[in-house]
Image (cartoon, rainbow, N blue to C red):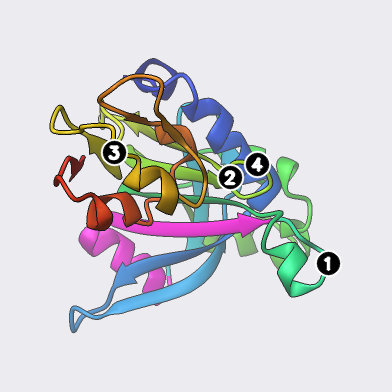
């Protein structure tokens, strides 16, 4: 199943991941069952999935082949700004899912789209060590702090037919008392009707409405 059929926005977010963010922190599990992270470049997307590569002699390769599952997070924005200002101009994407070794497939496209790779692996013989991986399925989150209010979205790709359901929602137990409105940092609760409705695309998932509601009308999604 194609990512664009799973979630129309998946193609857009994969494009952001590859072209704007590019370098991400990837987590796997080592032989002792402990988490290991490293920075990996997301090299290519076809709108349905994302491709990256590593050398078959690396521990990263061994871990990928053993678990065939990774989680990654990357962020972009705020370059040249001070810390306070930069933190408000960030786009971030997290993605986790199963991956597949597709051998040397897509090597040519990857080197064409990422010319700097030719400096690391300057000739075809040196490139024989490389193996390409792609996500066969995954669930992800997009987060944009540059908008006011913030923007977030869930997406899925491959055989993960549904995006993850996260955050909070307001139930019929709501009486319209307004307590949640006072504590919401993004002002993203619609209150024209009762029960109130959380605008999920702007919610920080801070949990203030959940903890402060005197009627326990807010639940985890």
As measured in the structure, the alpha-carbon distance from the residue carrying label 3 to the one carrying label 1 is: 41 Å
* Mark 1 neighbour class, 10 Å CA radius: few under 14, some 14 to 19, many 20 or more: few
Residue in the image at 29% along x and 38% along y: 177
Q: Which mark is residue 177?
A: 3
Q: Nearer the viewer, residue 40 or 138?
A: 138
Q: Nearer the viewer, mark 3 or mark 1?
A: 3
As measured in the structure, the alpha-carbon distance from the residue carrying label 3 to the one carrying label 4 is: 25 Å
- Residue furthest to the right in view is 80
Q: Nearer the viewer, mark 4 or mark 1?
A: 4
Label 4 sits on residue: 148
Residue in the image at 13% along x and 33% along y: 173
Of marks 2 and 1, which one's residue comes earlier in the chain? 2
Q: Nearer the viewer, mark 2 or mark 4?
A: 4
Q: Which mark is residue 17?
A: 2
Q: Nearer the viewer, residue 158 or 195?
A: 195
Query: Eyeballing the image, is 111 above or below 154?
Result: below
Secondary structure, mark 3, is: loop
Secondary structure, mark 2, is: helix
Of marks 3 and 2, which one's residue comes earlier in the chain? 2
Q: Which residues are magenta?
A: 57-76
Query: Eyeballing the image, is 119 above or below 186?
Result: below
As measured in the structure, the alpha-carbon distance from the residue carrying label 3 to the one carrying label 2 is: 41 Å
Label 1 sits on residue: 81
User: Is residue 65 located in the magenta-colored stretch of the structure?
Assistant: yes
Residue 202 placement (x, y as % from top left): 49, 38
Secondary structure, mark 4, is: loop
Of marks 4 and 1, which one's residue comes earlier in the chain? 1
Q: Nearer the viewer, mark 3 or mark 4?
A: 3
* Mark 3 neighbour class, 10 Å CA radius: few under 14, some 14 to 19, many 20 or more: few
Quarter of the picture holding the N terminus: top left
Secondary structure, mark 1, is: loop
- Whether residue 187 is visible to the viewer of this picture, yes or no, is yes
């Amino acid at each position: 199943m194609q990512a664009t059929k799973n979630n129309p926005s998946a193609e857009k977010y994969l494009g952001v991941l590859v072209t704007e963010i590019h370098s991400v922190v990837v987590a796997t599990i080592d032989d002792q069952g402990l988490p290991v992270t490293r920075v990996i470049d997301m090299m290519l997307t076809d709108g349905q999935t994302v491709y990256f590569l590593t050398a078959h002699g690396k521990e990263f390769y061994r871990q990928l082949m053993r678990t065939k599952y990774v989680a990654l997070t990357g962020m972009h924005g705020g370059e040249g700004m001070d810390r306070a200002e930069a933190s408000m101009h960030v786009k971030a994407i997290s993605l986790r899912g199963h991956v597949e070794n597709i051998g040397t497939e897509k090597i040519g496209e990857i080197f064409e789209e990422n010319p700097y790779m030719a400096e690391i692996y300057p000739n075809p013989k040196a490139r024989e060590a490389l193996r390409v991986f792609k996500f066969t399925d995954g669930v992800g989150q997009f987060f944009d702090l540059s908008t006011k209010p913030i923007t977030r979205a869930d997406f899925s790709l491959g055989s993960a037919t549904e995006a993850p359901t996260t955050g909070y929602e307001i139930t019929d137990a709501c009486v319209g008392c307004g307590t949640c409105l006072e504590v919401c940092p993004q002002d993203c609760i619609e209150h024209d009707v009762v029960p109130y409705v959380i605008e999920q695309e702007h919610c920080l998932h801070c949990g203030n409405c959940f903890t402060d509601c005197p009627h326990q009308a807010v639940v985890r999604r």
